[in-house]
Image (cartoon, helix red, strand yellow):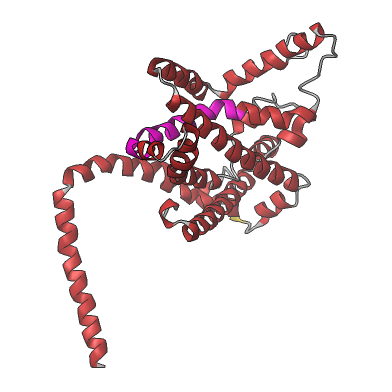
Amino acid sequence: MAEMQRASGTEITTVRRQKPALLKELAKNKVLYLMLLPGLLVLLVNNYLPMFGIVIAFKDYNYAKGFWKSDWVGFNNFEYLFNSKAAFLITRNTILYNVAFIVIAATVAVVLAIIFNELLNRRISKFYQSVMFLPYFFSWVVISYLVFALLSSDMGFVNKILISNGMQPVEWYVDPRFWPLIIILVNTWKWTGYDSIIYLAAIIGFDKSLYEAAAVDGASRFQQITKVMVPMLMPVITVLTLIKVGRIFFTDFGLFFNIPRNSGPLYDVTNVIETYVFRALRQTGDIGMASAAGFYQAVVGFIVVMTANYIVRKIDKDSSLF
């Protein structure tokens, strides 16, 4: 009993010591915390307050009754989503496309970052970086017209090349065989420049003396890149990959809706959860079902990122998110 009282007293003393330390920390860095406050408010309003909308996923939302008075329907909205014939198709497409995006985009972005870093002429390097970064600022609507200019059945640039070489033109917006590759190429073209800049910023910050030490030991420039640079870059690659893994059940609506131009014959290879929910919502107006799909995506994404982070933490604690 006495030991328990001593332990309890020790805990109370520790808490009392922590409070003044916390107050001292706040007083010492009050300017920094004030600078942080606007960002926290934006995060609260933009990311956390809308979470109350999760309730709609369990209701038969009625505009006349409003948010609070709409009838509860439990998991009926989820049943509609999972009982659909397209449930397996859209889930498969969403996961496989995202896996391809994560692997290919990370690989290409790292290679580009290394190439930019190895260019001796800094002006040329900055020019190439700007060219690769430019697609990031294009909306999917603009990109959809660029793709249409290439793949249009009548006036498309690609079909003109095929015809000039004695080949048959392709009905690109009717034939689904090529679209998995087209979707991956377009996504890589848009996002790789952005990711490569992040990796390049990390590479520039590496200690140059490590390369010099490797060169003294007889390592070629290729060996310096593969044995020194890439291993140091792995924590950054891991963190960015974990962030993208957390959104493995989310896709870019514009990519899968605007680029294929909402073509019906392509639904089997371009229909993902976002496009399916959009079309269903446009036809039925069922907000509850759309909210259920969003809640389902969020829960699965949370589980996936927690699992991936746990595995990474077991392998290398310093490379994990938390």
- Above or below residue 38? Residue 141 is above
Q: Which SS type dominates the magenta stretch? A: helix
Residue at figure coordinates x 44%, y 46% from the top left: 235
- For the question of whether residue 60 can be seen, the reply is no
Depth check, front residue: 266 or 280:
266
Residue at figure coordinates x 52%, y 58% from the top left: 311
Depth check, front residue: 120 or 146:
120
Q: Is residue 311 magenta?
A: no
Depth check, front residue: 147 or 61:
147
* Residue 171 position within the rendered picture, expressed as x and y whole percent measured from the top left: 80, 19
Left or right of 317, for residue 300: right
* Residue 309 position within the rendered picture, expressed as x and y whole percent measured from the top left: 49, 55
- Quarter of the rendering containing residue 267: top right
Residue at figure coordinates x 39%, y 15% from the top left: 123
* Residue 245 position within the rendered picture, expressed as x and y whole percent measured from the top left: 55, 46
- Above or below residue 240? Residue 164 is above
- Quarter of the rendering containing residue 76: bottom right
User: Which quadrant of the rendered structure holds the C terminus?
Assistant: bottom left
**Residue furthest to the bottom:** 1
Depth check, front residue: 218 or 254:
218
Count of numbered tags: 0
- For the question of whether residue 312 can be seen, the reply is yes
Q: Is residue 208 magenta?
A: yes
Left or right of 8, for residue 282: right
Residue at figure coordinates x 23%, y 76% from the top left: 11
- Magenta span: 187-210
User: Which quadrant of the rendered structure holds the N terminus?
Assistant: bottom left
- Above or below residue 138? Residue 212 is below
* Residue 201 position within the rendered picture, expressed as x and y whole percent measured from the top left: 39, 33
- Quarter of the rendering containing residue 173: top right
